[in-house]
Amino acid sequence: MFTLFKLPYAYNALEPHIDARTLEIHHTKHTQTYVDKLNAALEKYPQFQRLSVKELITDLERIPSEIRTAVRNNGGGVANHELFFHMLSPNGGGSPVGKLAAAIDATFGGFEKFQQQFTAAATGHFASGWVWLSLDNAGKLLIETTPGHDSPLMFDRKPILVCDLWEHAYYLKHQWRRGDSVADWFRVLDWQHAERNFCNP
């Protein structure tokens, strides 16, 4: 069964950009709830308990219909949050590096234009969800948003980086100002981690 992953930094390590209280609640309450509900959904299905969360949500059609929505919502919640939290670092910020930097330049016309398009997608997304930099089957980068806890993995695309658009991720500090929260997210984004996601199979 699944357990809540640990963070590679302290709850106050991302301040002032992401405050400690928000990070603690986000991790120990919201994400823990998704873990608990995923375990509850899989309780009577031991054949799926051996799979990783990524494997569960990548092929939802094999999940029994009576638990498919619960696995989609809560498995997606676990997978998305694990990627989100591990994309952040006290030493983050700055600009893309390596092959990812070159791909962003080629696709979006430079890092500044990428930031603008990414932020526009985030602020333009209605209600809760996520904004991603993904890689499609043709090897092309794209900015996309997903509702709820859907992931590009569910649509045969590879997540490179992600920003959480649920209000619980930013409301204590930024209230309704989602654009400000995305700006602060960029200030702690670990581009080395994003580069590894981009380069690794």
Image: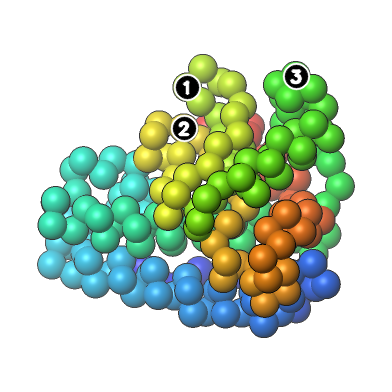
Can you identify the residue that label 3 sits on?
A: 106
Q: Kindly state the secondary structure of the residue where label 3 is placed.
A: helix
- Tell me if label 2 and label 3 are in contact, CB under 8 Å: no
Marker disc for residue 137: 1
- Tell me if label 2 and label 1 are in contact, CB under 8 Å: yes
Pick whichever of labels 2 and 3 is earlier in the sequence. Answer: 3
Residue under the point 52% across and 50% down: 126
Residue 10 showing in the rendered view:
no
> Label 2, label 1: how many angstroms apart (C-alpha)?
7 Å
Viewer-side residue, 89 vs 124: 124
Left or right: where does residue 166 sit relative to residue 91?
A: left
Residue 90 showing in the rendered view:
yes
Viewer-side residue, 56 vs 71: 71
Pick whichever of labels 2 and 1 is earlier in the sequence. Answer: 1
Q: Is residue 21 above or below residue 48?
A: below
Q: Amino acid at mark 3?
A: Ala
> Label 2, label 3: how many angstroms apart (C-alpha)?
19 Å
Residue 106 at x, y percent in the picture: 75, 19
Residue under the point 51% across and 17% down: 138
Residue 125 at x, y percent in the picture: 56, 47
> Label 1, label 3: how many angstroms apart (C-alpha)?
17 Å
Marker disc for residue 157: 2
Task: Check the image and tell me how it is coloured.
Answer: rainbow
Q: Quadrant of residue 24?
A: bottom right
Q: Amino acid at mark 2?
A: Arg
Q: Is residue 137 above or below residue 78?
A: above
Pick whichever of labels 1 and 3 is earlier in the sequence. Answer: 3
Q: Kindly state the secondary structure of the residue where label 2 is placed.
A: loop
